[in-house]
Image (tube, grey):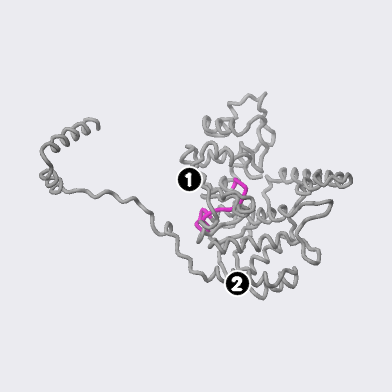
Amino acid sequence: MGILGLSKLLYQECPASIKEEEMKNYFGRRIAIDASMSIYQFVIAMKGFSEGQGMELTNEAGEVTSHINGLFQRTLRMVDEGLKPIYVFDGAPPEMKRAELEERKQKAEEAAAQFAKAKEEGDDEMMEKMSKRTVRVSREQIEECKKLLKLMGMPVVQASGEAEAQCAELVRHNKAWAVATEDMDALTFGSKILVRHLTFSEAKKRPIAEYHMDTILAHTGLTMEQFIDLSILLGCDYVPKIPGIGPHKAWEGIKTHKSIEAFIQSLDPAKHPIPADFNYEGARELFKHPDVVPASDVTIEFREPDEEGLIKFLVQEKLFNKDRVDKGIQRLRAALQKKVQGRLDSFFKIIPKAPPVKTAREEDKKSADMPAGKMRKAGVNGAKKAVKK
């Protein structure tokens, strides 16, 4: 879920913090990608039904390959543009997320039941809708994606906890430039820059959205601690929401009262009863000090693709077209060997050129060359300007 309604709130209250970009503008950038989120997008994008028949991408043997095909093609597109993707995979979820995961499981079971009913009734539209709600990325699919990326020479990072928190850790310590995910909590975990819509920006005809944390804090006047409190009030994966507190009330509450504690004191308990399991202090601590592998212990290395390994995995095992895989390997080698010009902003800070300062002698010469009438006029105007100052 991430942070409920945060992106819309920032568009309303702090549009200056958001930039629209194209993938080609990230050449030379190391981007830490929430791998599980990307793989889920690939799987759900191909999930559908037409006249009761599945539309998932499969090979000749009937094996689902949507996740492998999507990851292979999108990674090639990224490296073609000079972007350097670092894929980060989820570890064990924190204990505070158990209730959220149980709720998701229950919703998936309800969707499966509705899907079965729609199938009996021959309702293809409802079947497609419910099928997308039952999508889960399996452990086997995750391991296949890790294998693919390693064979392609891409860095793979296994998080100890939440992938977004691990991505933010890499950005904070300059191992990556930004986090790429759809979940806004990457900002709450402390990432300096968040990139959304990177994976499917072209397919969905929407620009990449780039959020800058320093600009958010500067324009809103919030501290990082207050931003975390705002995120908790909006709705996160770790605690339930306070009834009746929507984005506007959460925003005004933190802006006015500065903390969750003070905001709660101002609420009418009859209108806004605080849930018994609203452990906001625990959620706050989790956002400030998440379970991550220290960035100093993470090695980021881009390697030559394993041509023999890719042919064996994609062509022999997964029955991909060999010519297509060979072309992909060529693109990987070209991207790795290509000498990309260094980004100018990584070396210099461009400062506007100041106008030249005239010496007293030059000013005297200018006055001497000026006709008397103009001198008097200039003198009067100069005096007026001095008075105005």
Say whether disc 1 or disc 2 marks the residue closer to the N-terminus.
1
State the residue in front, 277 or 204.
204
Q: Residue 309 appears in which quarter of the rendering?
A: bottom right
**Tag 1 near tag 2, CB within 8 Å:** no
The quadrant in which the N terminus is found is top right
Checking the image for residue 20, the label placed there is: none
Residue depicted at 17% across the width and 36% down the height: 378
Give the residue at x 66% y 25%: 271
Report, in whole angstroms, how far the alpha carbon at label 1 lies from the one at label 2.
40 Å
Which of the 4 quarters of the picture holds residue 36? bottom right
For image coordinates 71% across by 53% down, the residue present is: 45
Residue range corresponding to the magenta coloring: 171-185
Specify whether residue 146 is painted magenta.
no
Identify residue type, mark 2: Gln
Label 2 Cα crowd, 10 Å radius (few <14 / some 14-19 / many 20+): few
> Any mark on residue 330, and which?
2
Amino acid residing under circle 1? Asp
The answer to whether residue 295 is above or below residue 219 is: below
Q: Residues within 10 Å of mark 1 (few under 14, many from 20)?
A: some
Which mark is drawn over residue 214? 1
Q: Residue 77, relative to residue 20: is it above or below? A: below
Residue 225: x and y in percent read 53, 40
Coordinates of residue 52 in the picture (x, y in percent) = 84, 51
**Number of numbered discs:** 2
Seen in the image, is 121 located left or right of residue 82?
Answer: right
Q: Is residue 250 left or right of residue 146?
A: left
Q: Secondary structure at mark 2?
A: helix
Q: Give the label, 1 or 2, closer to the camera.
A: 2
- Which quadrant does the C terminus fall into? top left
Tell me the residue at 68%/56% (across/down): 39
Q: Secondary structure at mark 1?
A: helix
